[in-house]
Image (spheres, rainbow, N blue to C red):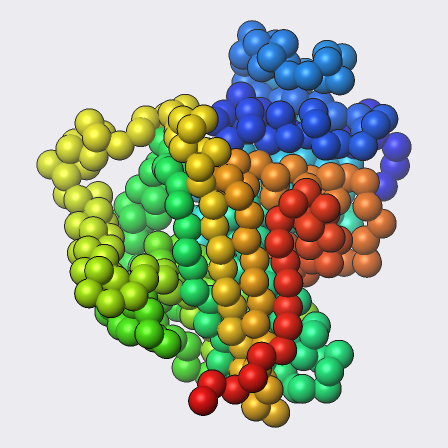
């Protein structure tokens, strides 16, 4: 990659999570890192920069609308790496991905939209491979903890000679809020599935993000939405992001030549506690998710949600972000019968405070680190896996793997 004006550019810097990511970069980017902030409003960019620490005072500002292909091409050509927070990505995201693929510029985003990622793969994987660009979707809470946990489990099992992974389950516990941007992305996915048969088929396919669907092993996958159930003395309920995270993990496995194991079966569930309270909570979560999707499918429901859910640019309060946390425990059984547990956790609202750290560190890894050679439409695990895990550990997130005894 030839010399560029910037090391990293944060596009959509004035969005809710963009501003949090800019704050993280201002406090954690190594001295001398050439950071630029980008968006469609110079006035809002100036206002954001003025509220950041002094180190950001001279950061360049780049004005580029998501519909201005010439401006996006100039932005992509000016930097080594770009991170985008501009969603819903299905509506606004593809032109920037295309610009980065053409310019040989590394790219990261926060999307949790299966339809968008599939479109970006189909349109941009080949040009990115030709230019040397790494296009890395899912660089926030969706799906960094899931993707890196399974990568680290496979690496440890491989180092121990335990064989590939077979049955892998992530149990999620968390506390956090929701923003208007997240709601808009969920609506975009629901609307696509409602109106487009091809989108509905893609949403049902557990290997829908595979680089080569026909080459996938014929291994039945667990359902993304399972009824409440007791597991190991604790109740589980459907996890809202399972249908996305599981597909990212399976794509990572395929991109790595099925390094995790051709018999991998992966699922995610929400851990809601023990006893009668856990059972009631699991039932409530299941019913609530069904009601939310149902409301999004009907005009009266959508109108009601508009009145009660956060709008564009709105998100959790500082108090909610500070009080948030997440903990994932991913248990893997290997081909030899040995069992490993990955624990991933962090303080801060998962979708915002913790996500700003994940996206910021992914962007810095793409812009600054010496990474193993690869290019194309990738995942966090395949593009920046071990480097990102090391960066997140240094930032205070936990990524641990250990062997555990078989259940008795």
Q: Residue at x 51, y 73 (%)?
A: 331
Q: In which quadrant will I find the C terminus?
A: bottom left
Q: Residue furthest right?
A: 3
Compared with 394, 68 (above or below) is: above
Q: Residue at x 55, y 48 (%)?
A: 346
Q: Residue at x 71, y 80 (%)?
A: 158
Task: Point out residue 72 in the picture as x, y percentages from the top left corner.
Answer: 63, 28
Q: Toward which corner of the image does residue 355 lie, by quadrant?
A: top right
Task: Point out residue 192 in the picture as x, y percentages from the top left corner.
Answer: 32, 48
Q: Is residue 195 left or right of residue 129?
A: left
Q: Residue furthest bottom?
A: 336
Compared with 391, 150 (above or below) is: below
Observer able to see residue 351: no
Task: Decide which of 400, 242 is in the foreground and name it.
Answer: 400
Observer able to see residue 273: yes
Task: Point out residue 180 in the picture as x, y percentages from the top left corner.
Answer: 36, 31
Compared with 79, 148 (above or below) is: below
Compared with 95, 311 (above or below) is: above
Q: Is residue 272 left or right of residue 135?
A: left
Q: Residue furthest left?
A: 300
Q: How many marks?
A: 0
Q: Toward which corner of the image does residue 61 lie, by quadrant?
A: top right
Q: Is residue 353 left or right of residue 58?
A: left
Q: Is residue 236 left or right of residue 26?
A: left
Task: Decide which of 164, 90 is in the foreground and name it.
Answer: 164
Task: Point out residue 359 in the picture as x, y percentages from the top left corner.
Answer: 61, 40
Q: Residue at x 40, y 33 (%)?
A: 320
Q: In which quadrant will I find the N terminus?
A: top right
């Amino acid at each position: 990659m030839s010399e560029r004006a910037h090391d990293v550019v944060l596009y959509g810097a004035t969005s809710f999570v963009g501003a949090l990511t800019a704050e993280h970069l201002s406090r954690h980017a190594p001295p001398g890192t050439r950071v630029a902030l980008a968006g469609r409003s110079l006035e809002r960019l100036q206002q954001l920069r003025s509220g950041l620490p002094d180190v950001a005072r001279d950061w360049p500002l780049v004005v580029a609308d998501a519909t201005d292909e010439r401006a996006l091409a100039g932005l992509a050509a000016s930097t080594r790496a770009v991170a985008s927070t501009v969603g819903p990505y299905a509506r606004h995201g593809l032109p920037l991905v295309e610009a980065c693929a053409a310019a040989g510029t590394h790219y990261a985003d926060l999307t949790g939209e299966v339809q968008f990622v599939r479109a970006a793969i189909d349109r941009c994987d080949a040009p990115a491979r030709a230019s040397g660009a790494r296009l890395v979707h899912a660089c926030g809470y969706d799906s960094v903890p899931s993707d890196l946990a399974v990568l680290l489990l496979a690496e440890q099992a491989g180092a121990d000679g335990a064989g590939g992974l077979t049955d892998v389950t992530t149990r999620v516990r968390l506390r956090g809020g929701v923003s208007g941007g997240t709601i808009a992305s969920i609506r975009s996915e629901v609307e696509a599935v409602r109106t487009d048969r091809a989108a509905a088929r893609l949403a049902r396919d557990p290997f829908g993000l595979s680089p080569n669907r026909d080459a996938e092993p014929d291994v039945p996958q667990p359902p993304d939405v399972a009824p409440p159930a007791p597991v190991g003395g604790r109740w589980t309920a459907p996890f809202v992001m399972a249908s996305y995270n599981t597909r990212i993990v399976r794509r990572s496995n395929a991109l790595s030549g099925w390094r995790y194991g051709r018999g991998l079966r992966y699922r995610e569930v929400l851990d809601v506690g023990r006893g009668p309270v856990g059972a009631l909570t699991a039932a409530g979560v299941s019913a609530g998710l069904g009601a939310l999707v149902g409301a999004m499918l009907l005009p009266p429901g959508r109108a009601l949600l508009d009145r009660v859910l956060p709008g564009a640019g709105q998100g959790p309060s500082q108090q909610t972000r500070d009080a948030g946390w997440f903990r994932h425990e991913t248990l893997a059984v290997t081909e030899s019968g040995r069992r490993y547990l990955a624990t991933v956790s962090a303080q801060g609202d998962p979708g915002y405070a913790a996500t700003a750290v994940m996206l910021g560190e992914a962007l810095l890894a793409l812009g600054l680190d010496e990474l193993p050679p690869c290019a194309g439409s990738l995942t966090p695990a395949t593009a920046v896996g071990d480097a990102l895990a090391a960066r997140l550990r240094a930032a205070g997130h936990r990524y641990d793997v250990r062997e555990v005894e078989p259940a008795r």
